[in-house]
Amino acid sequence: MEPKRLIELYDRCFDGVAVERRFWHIASARWRIRLRRATYRPLFPAICGVSADQLVLEFANREMAETELWREFDCPKELGAGVLDLRTSTSRARPGRAAIRRLLESVKAEKLWINPDCGLARLPRHLAFAKLQALVAGTHRVRGELTGAPSISNRPPAVQGDHELR
């Protein structure tokens, strides 16, 4: 579908609906189509004009590809960036500080939200919780590095050992 048509359909879904904020998650669907490389590029720059306040895109399961699109097209929307790949084991699913820093090269900190890639409902609860703890801890560490504030005091108390972000 042409990006303009896709955006028109999204916007029409909200006709007559009063909401404070709009989010649009666009999955890369790479898990379904393993032979074809998923890309968000064809959606730009049109997607930057959608009525959504935040675009939620997957990056972790795409090796952090196309993080530069925000800067390249000067997109004014917030970015909900999926930096935690849910398909890897808990010990390997560590959204590294490098991934978050890479996003900050293209997206202003006040416009960046750190998320898991989609699909938490498919995981056992204890694994989903451990992955989210690692995600929060990693984000706090980057925030501490950028602001000079100690990040350990902000870390959730249950984050430790194998699930801790390094």
Image (tube, rainbow, N blue to C red):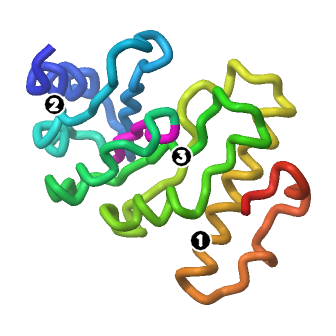
Mark sitting earlier along the chain (3/2): 2
Q: CA distance from mark 3 to mark 2?
A: 21 Å
Q: Secondary structure at mark 3?
A: strand
Mark 2 touches mark 1? (CB < 8 Å): no
- Reading the image, the residue beneath label 1 is 142
Q: Secondary structure at mark 2?
A: helix
Mark sitting earlier along the chain (1/3): 3
Kind of residue sitting beneath label 2:
Pro
Quarter the N terminus occupies: top left
- The image shows residue 157, relative to residue 65, as above or below, that is below
Quarter the C terminus occupies: bottom right
Q: Magenta stretch containing residue 55, yes or no?
A: yes
Numbered circle sitting on residue 104 = none
| The quadrant where residue 93 appears | top right
Q: Secondary structure at mark 1?
A: helix
Numbered circle sitting on residue 42 = 2
| The quadrant where residue 105 appears | bottom left
- Reading the image, the residue beneath label 3 is 83
Q: Position of residue 68 (x, y in %)?
A: 27, 54
Q: CA distance from mark 1 to mark 3?
A: 13 Å
User: Which stretch is magenta?
Assistant: 54-60
Say whether residue 71 is left or right of residue 155: left
- The image shows residue 78, relative to residue 6, as above or below, that is below
Mark 3 touches mark 2? (CB < 8 Å): no
| Residue visible at 61% across and 57% down in the picture | 96
| Residue visible at 77% across and 38% down in the picture | 90
